[in-house]
Image (tube, rainbow, N blue to C red):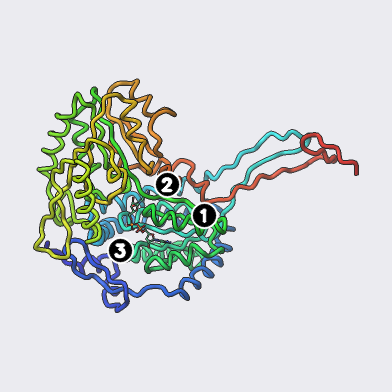
Amino acid sequence: MDFDAKEILARNGIEHLAAQKGPLQVRTPIDGRVLANLDVATAQHTEMAIQNSVKAFKEWRTVPAPRRGELIRLLGEELRASKAALGELVSLETGKILQEGLGEVQEMIDICDFAVGLSRQLYGLTIASERPNHRMMETWHPMGPCLVVTAFNFPVAVWAWNAALALVCGNSVIWKPSEKTPLSAAAVQQIFERTCARFGTAPAALSQLVQGERERGEQLVRDSRVPLISATGSTRMGREIAKVASERFARTILELGGNNAGIVCPSADLSLVVRAVAFAAMGTAGQRCTTLRRLIVHSSVYDKVVSEVKKVYEQVRIGSPLDSASMIGPLIDKGAYSSMVKALSAAKEDGGRVFGGERVYAELPDAYYVKPAIVEMKKQTDIVCHETFAPILYVLKYDTVEEAIALNNDVPQGLSSSLFTTDMREMELFLSAAGSDCGIANVNIGPSGAEIGGAFGGEKETGGGRESGSDSWKAYMRRATNTINFGKDLPLAQGIEFGV
Ligand code: NAD
């Protein structure tokens, strides 16, 4: 586990942060060494951030949207130039392999490109009026400061998904990153500030960073000057935010936990299944919201699929995420490891047969590397219905496709799902109203690794929010319906006569 953490911080221009003596201790999951003790925002700093964000919003909302898009175009350019360094920092701070760290930065670049185009496409409708000499139309307006709360596992991409859209839509942004990944956030904030300097006329404090534990997030969620909250993280967090936000009727975009299944049908192309399962279940050490957690296999191919998948699991290379040979890095921390151990023992109690799951590199006491686990289950018990944020793949058997779809849907979460088949009827059923109840339903690819062009998010305990592509931008704006009378009479809607 040989690497120079200082060099990685320096390549991102944040080496000075290592000298701080604040209360937020940041460790790399690679070997558990301390990277920095960061200063955090106080309640007063956060109050100032809100005030400044309101000010920035009032200026930014009057800037034409295509000009706002120009800022995001420049941000995309800066991110392209910083991709290698930032990808490495993400890898250092989260433990995801370098390929995935770079992929995360690419996702930021992709959403910038999308948002630049969007800045010229914030369309409203023109609607036929029932009244003579009247015209109806919809206009879309920015909302105000947009709070973006992010999770540790996508420490930079989720900010970009939100910020790129929020900013072209004319909002200001306040970012509360995960307390586990504040360095990646600090590096991105610097890139954003550099972009603003190049742009020249962006208001000060257009997008700000509020570092700290969850109470900073709570303060921002309570504040009625923040009309829009986009929060990514656990269902527990989403439940807390939803309660507070609904009290004050704030708009929320919630992106919470997933418990994603893949159904393998008798006609599936098995070589494709095995490769898809490998990435979807083991990638990011099982720490993606869209990680494949349940494999539902037809009884006719069950033994073959399970034995092929086990072979791949045996060959997978676990090691430092900065080493290009590694396919799986460490879990984020001890808490994640304990959850995995607990889940495996609960699964065993429920009759599950466990393959893998052991800790490796135990000579590193503060790093938590594990062999990914496969657990064959007779039934979808409580533990299978729970999202354990670790590489555990539960395998279940089915006999009819209806039964498989019922298992897919019979969990509290509704983020992503996939079906492997070459049978058109099964595919269409899975994608129909009687099929998968998730926000994402794929065929012949795994449930993870979404492209930014589509709307991203899920149903039920996943929170119902949509981010990224398609028409997700509408969540970042308020809609006004306008009726214009260009005649000399005042006809009332519904033909109402009012005698004055
Ligand atoms: P977490 O819920 O512990 O923390 C996420 C963020 O929320 C952090 O910034 C934290 O400080 C903040 N927070 C926590 N409680 C809060 C509160 N009451 N008010 C305001 N802010 C609060 O999640 P995590 O462990 O960092 O991330 C893993 C979870 O995130 C998993 O459940 C995963 O599925 C989910 N996730 C979902 C998506 C998605 O798009 N659906 C994407 C990534 C991660």
Label 3, ligand 1: CB separation under 8 Å: yes
Q: Residue at x 13, y 51 (%)?
A: 358
Q: Do the residues bearing badges 3 and 2 touch, measured as CB atoms within 8 Å?
A: no
Q: Which mark is residue 468?
A: 2
Q: Foreground mark, 1 or 2?
A: 2
* Residue 90 falls left or right of residue 121: left
Is 225 located above or below residue 444 in the figure? Answer: below
Look at the image and tell me in which quarter the N terminus lies.
Answer: bottom left
Disc 3 from disc 2: Cα separation = 24 Å
Mark 1: secondary structure: helix
Whether residue 385 is visible, yes or no, is yes
In depth, the one of 296 and 13 nearer the eye is: 296
Is 376 located above or below residue 462 in the figure? Answer: above
Amino acid type, callout 2: Ser
Q: Residue at x 33, y 37 (%)?
A: 417
Amino acid type, callout 1: Arg
* Residue 23 falls left or right of residue 337: right
Q: Do the residues bearing badges 1 and 2 touch, measured as CB atoms within 8 Å?
A: no
Q: Quadrant of ligand 1?
A: bottom left
What residue did someone put label 1 on? Answer: 67
Whichever of callouts 1 and 2 sits on the residue coming sooner in the sequence is: 1
Q: Which mark is residue 157?
A: none
Image position, residue 345 (x, y; %): 19, 50
Q: Quadrant of residue 26?
A: bottom left
Q: Quadrant of residue 193?
A: bottom left
Image position, residue 429 (x, y; %): 38, 25
Amino acid type, callout 3: Lys
Image position, residue 124 (x, y; %): 59, 42
Q: Residue at x 30, y 59 (%)?
A: 82
Look at the image and tell me in which quarter the C terminus lies.
Answer: top right
Disc 3 from disc 1: Cα separation = 35 Å
What residue did someone put label 3 on? Answer: 180
